Image (spheres, grey):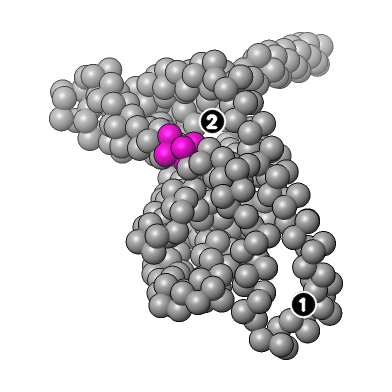
Amino acid sequence: MTARLAARNLENRVFLGLLLVVTLALGGVLAPFYGALFWAAVVAIVFMPVQRRLVARLGRRRTAAALITLALVVLLVILPLVSIGAALTREASGLYRDLQSGQLDVAREFDRIVGLLPAWAGALLDRIGLGDLASLKARLGAGAADAGRALAARVVDIGQNTLDVVVGFFVMLYVAFFLIRDGTRLTRRLRLAIPLEPAVKRALFAQIAAVVRATVKGNILVAIVQGALGGIAFRVLGIHGAVLWGTLMAFLSLLPAVGAALVWLPVALWLLLSGQLWQGLALAAWGTLVIGLVDNVLRPILVGKDIRMPDWLVLLTTLGGLALFGLNGFVIGPMVGALFLAVWELFVDSRRTRAR
């Protein structure tokens, strides 16, 4: 009996080791497509409620419902992003040409604004080492040239990696279709494989889906709204590169507390110092009363109170995710933080239940 038990334990360990090896091997094979697979999973989780409603209306035809859901993803998400990307490329190219031709002289504009400052402000610039305008203009010009070269190099890199981007895009759509169609079945099989109590597994999977949806809606949608509002304000005020600045505000809006103000506030100050008083005041009022309040109004509605993270954790997870995963980290980082809080909350609840 003891020998049989020992043999059975050895078989289990060997099988678990084999399972771990083949899982890691598959992860290594799929690693080049981790971004496409990640976004396919996000799309499937976010649009799964749409899939369920369509399945109920189409008489349980899951394939047709998945095709319609994927078409909605393309129409509502991907095509607008492509249009914004094209406009952003045009404006970035125009900005690069203006910098190269000298039509946009950053140092000259800075010199003009400094000339409008009062004496105490000039003395303050001297104290912090910005009083030597000649050297400062040289640094500003060199910085603008470096930024232009970096932008040009980035455009070249994007052109060289066009095939990888296209392949990743179609891989994402292809995988998303199957995850949308078979997501319920895959989730059921995954639950069976996890060695946890059924109640804990149900709560864990429900919490993971809620966290993914809330993170995407609470971060990306709020960022899009803030960037759009900022871009509209820039376009109305006649500021060049409204799409470019709006996109930058959308990305920075993922950072709590400061966010889009890192863009609109310096521009509002520049307008005030350059003599455009009503434009500067209007932009400052719009940024404070409209853009700034979007986060406080929309995010609690989209995210909900149960999984709302502290601002400091949002900031750290966003920056850490960006450092580790690149652009995908804007979503992966906060999502990991939210899952961390959710799993610990489930653990505490289970311990509290057992203690009763």
Relative placement, left or right, of 326 versus 270 is: right
Is residue 320 on the magenta stretch?
Answer: no
Q: Which disc, if any, is residue 125?
A: 1
- In this picture, which residue range is highlighted in magenta? 86-90
The secondary structure making up most of the magenta span is helix
Q: Nearer the viewer, residue 276 or 338?
A: 276
Q: Which of the 4 image quarters holds residue 137?
A: bottom right
Rendered-image quadrant of the C terminus: bottom right
Please tell me how many numbered marks the rendered image carries: 2
Q: Residue at x 65, y 66 (%)?
A: 110
Residue that label 2 marks: 38
Q: Is residue 113 above or below residue 345?
A: below
| Mark nearer the N terminus (2 vs 1) | 2
Rendered-image quadrant of the N terminus: top right
**Mark 2 vs 1: CB contact within 8 A:** no
Residue density around tag 2, few if under 14, some if 14–19, many if 20 or more, within 10 Å? some
Q: Residue at x 45, y 59 (%)?
A: 239
Cα distance between the residues tagged 2 and 1: 48 Å
Relative placement, left or right, of 204 versus 3 is: left
Please state the horizontal and vertical placement of residue 97, each as a whole percent of the image: 56, 40
Q: Nearer the viewer, residue 129 or 311?
A: 129
Q: Amino acid at mark 2?
A: Phe
Would residue 354 be seen by someone viewing this image from the given angle?
no
Relative placement, left or right, of 52 versus 296 is: left
Would residue 291 be seen by someone viewing this image from the given angle?
yes
- Secondary structure state at the residue bearing disc 1: helix
Residue density around tag 1, few if under 14, some if 14–19, many if 20 or more, within 10 Å? some
